[in-house]
Amino acid sequence: SAIAGIKNEDIDIALENDIIIIKGERSNPAEDEDKNYFTRECYFGPFYREIIIPRGIDASRIDANIKNGMLIIRMPKIENKKITNEQE
């Protein structure tokens, strides 16, 4: 998720009932009410997103990092151990 311009203290990432909740607020560094923009690359104000964790994910090992304006959430799969039937 692109979160350019967000400080770490302005974003909250939580895990609740197999849902990752991302919320925060992007403040406008140059609030100028006199300007009327046709388009903007970044929108300012509060944001909120929910991501449902897929089956087979180890929720205890989910990791989130912010690097160069990108929020990276890693969701490792549960490692299935193969059971071998040893019959003699």
Image (cartoon, rainbow, N blue to C red):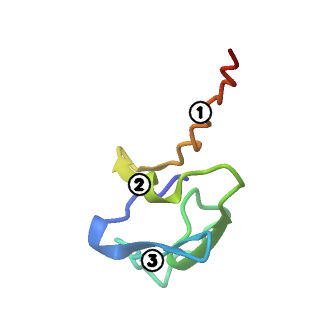
**Residue 27 higher or lower than 80, as above or below:** below
Q: State the separation of the CA atoms marked 2 and 3.
A: 15 Å
Q: Secondary structure at mark 1?
A: loop
Give the residue drawn at x 49%, y 82%.
Answer: 34
Q: Is residue 59 above or below residue 27?
A: above
Q: Give the percent coordinates (x, y) of residue 2.
A: 52, 52
Comes first in the chain, label 3 or label 1: 3
- Residue on which the image places disc 2: 64
Counting residues from the N terminus, which is met first, the one under dot 2 or under dot 3?
3
Disc 1 or disc 2, which is closer to the eye? 1
Q: CA distance from mark 3 to mark 1?
A: 39 Å
Towards the viewer: 12 or 30: 12
Left or right: where 35 falls relative to 61: right
Q: Nearer the viewer, mark 2 or mark 3?
A: 2
- Amino acid residing under circle 1: Lys
User: Disc 1 marks which residue?
Assistant: 81
Task: Residue at 35% x, 45% y: name it.
Answer: 67
> Which image quadrant for residue 31?
bottom left
Residue at the spot of label 3: 24
Give 20 or 46, whichever is nearer the viewer.
20
Of labels 1 and 2, earlier in sequence is 2
Q: Which SS class for mark 3?
A: strand
Asked if the residues shown at circle 2 and circle 3 are in contact, with their CB atoms under 8 angstroms apart, the answer is no
Secondary structure beneath label 2: strand
**Tag 3–tag 1 contact (CB < 8 Å):** no
Q: Position of residue 33 (x, y in %)?
A: 48, 85
Please state which amino acid type lies under the numbered disc 3: Gly
